Amino acid sequence: MIKEPEKIRIRIKTRTQIIMEYVRTISISFLCALVFTLMLSIHARSEMIKNLYVNAEEQQKMDEQLALQLVKQSDFTKDLRSKKYSICLQVGNLYEAAHQYEKAQLAYELAVEKAKPGVYTPYRKLAVVLISQEKFDEANKLLDSVFDVNNKQLIKFKTRAYIVMGDKYYSIGKFLSAAKSYEKAKFYYDKFVIKDESIDESIKTRIVNSYIKTADVMVKNNYNSDAVRFLKKAEVYEPDNFYIQYKLAIIYADLDPIQSVKYFEPLLDKKPQDIDYGVYTKALMKSANIADLEGKPTLAKYYRYKIHSVDLFINQKVIYKNDIEISLNSFTVRKLWFKYRLKASYIIKNVSNSDINKLSAEFVLRQKDKTKEVVQAVCVKKSKPLRPDSESRDIKVVFGKNIFTRKELEQYTIDIYLFKDERYKTYIGTMKVPVKSIKSKESVLSLIDF
């Protein structure tokens, strides 16, 4: 019996299904086009911003050259007193661009005399050229001469002027004066109803850095009490700043050991690898002795127990930068199928006073500020400790990142960290990636910490 061939069933789509498929296709195409357009626009915007900075620098250089040529040809300050406000302002701009600040000052002073009430442009420009000449007293008198704190333009002008003045003080090493100028800038900036968080943080950072630098100067001159006072001022703005707390802990170790211990204790949980354990131990011992003298044996016992527990913690968890010497032994830049593969060999040596039973290393390949790859390697195991001044260990590192040109290699650096516990990584240093292979004991490179 012969079977009849099966009939092929043809599915006829309804009009609704056809329309829906058409709409779906159009939507997907539109979405892809939109994503592609957005990516192009983001790229174009970033390129535009780069070009703006480049063009601005080039334009500034051209303006300087043109201004120098013009002021060499003629003295524009002649009969300037009889000229209009706008002329005085333009002449000031010309001499400022040519870096002839004395003549710019004269022109801006005349512009200030001729300016209408509420116009602060000539005040701002005059303040800048006075600060550029380090005529701080005159600049302060100028700023004090206008005091309508309800005027938004004036508030903006004074905020900027005091930041410029602080930056100038900081650049010439007058850190305390810089801090005071920045605090005045913050006083006026706080009067803004709508604030930019980045500007506010920038002013705070400037204040903190200035007070820290001031404290450092005080310590160098053995004025430790004054150093504490300035660090306390910085602490008001950044109470959780590790380096402020650490500097206070170090200074208090001689002035007030118990206070020093109070500052040291929370830091042990944050960055124990950055703490000078020797100073901390001395502060704990002095605190124990003080507690004994004050008739507080329980507290004295606590301080002495703390010395023992911290000692165990440091030995098991922390590696200090000065405990290890690490250097580059060889670096291979090998081209394979149009790509460069990076291989490195490092030598580590124990220069501490005790055995190191556990140690790992982390190598971070960076292109400028972007992390491209992280490679970890075990350096020391318990079965084979690294003893003081013993034979060096060799660490081999192979990066998987493919680099296509030698020019690109110049943009790469490697950050190196060592650690016993991954939570407490110690930054050792940074090295530039060599453009050529290095394979010689004579060309051992030390790390560049920049």
Image (cartoon, rainbow, N blue to C red):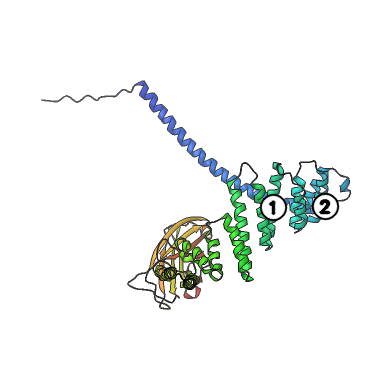
In percent of width and height, residue 295 lies at 46, 71
Q: Is residue 30 above or below residue 306?
A: above
Rendered residue at 58%/54% (across/down): 237
Q: Nearer the viewer, residue 372 or 160?
A: 160
Please tell me in which quadrant of the rendered image residue 87 appears: top right
- Quadrant position of residue 72: bottom right
Mark 1 to mark 2 CA distance (whole Å): 21 Å
Q: Which quadrant: the N terminus?
A: top left
Q: Which residue is mark 2?
A: 106
Instruction: Compare residues 387 and 63 and report the one nearer the observer.
Output: 387
Question: Is 232 in front, or is 45?
Answer: 232
Callout in the foreground (1, 2): 1
Query: Can you identify the residue that label 1 sits on?
Result: 162
Q: Nearer the viewer, residue 29 or 425?
A: 425
Left or right for 108, reference 443: right
Q: Which amino acid lies under the numbered mark 2 shown in the image of this protein?
A: Leu
Q: Residues within 10 Å of mark 1 (few under 14, many from 20)?
A: many
Residue 67 in sight here: yes
Sequence order check, earlier mark of 1 and 2: 2
Q: Amino acid at mark 1?
A: Tyr
In the rendered image, the vertical position of residue 344 relative to residue 127, given as above or below = below
Query: Residue 403, position in %: x, y?
Result: 47, 57
**Residue 350 in the image: x percent, y percent?**
43, 74
Which residue sits at x=43%, y=67%?
A: 318
420 sits to left or right of 225? left
Could one spot residue 433 in this view of the protein? no
Residue 175 image offset from top left, x and y in percent: 66, 61
Q: Is 229 left or right of 349, judged from the image as shown?
A: right
Instruction: Identify the residue at image location x=79%, y=41%.
Output: 117
Secondary structure beneath disc 1? helix
Q: Please state, as top left, top right, bottom left or bottom right, where the C terminus lies in the image.
A: bottom right
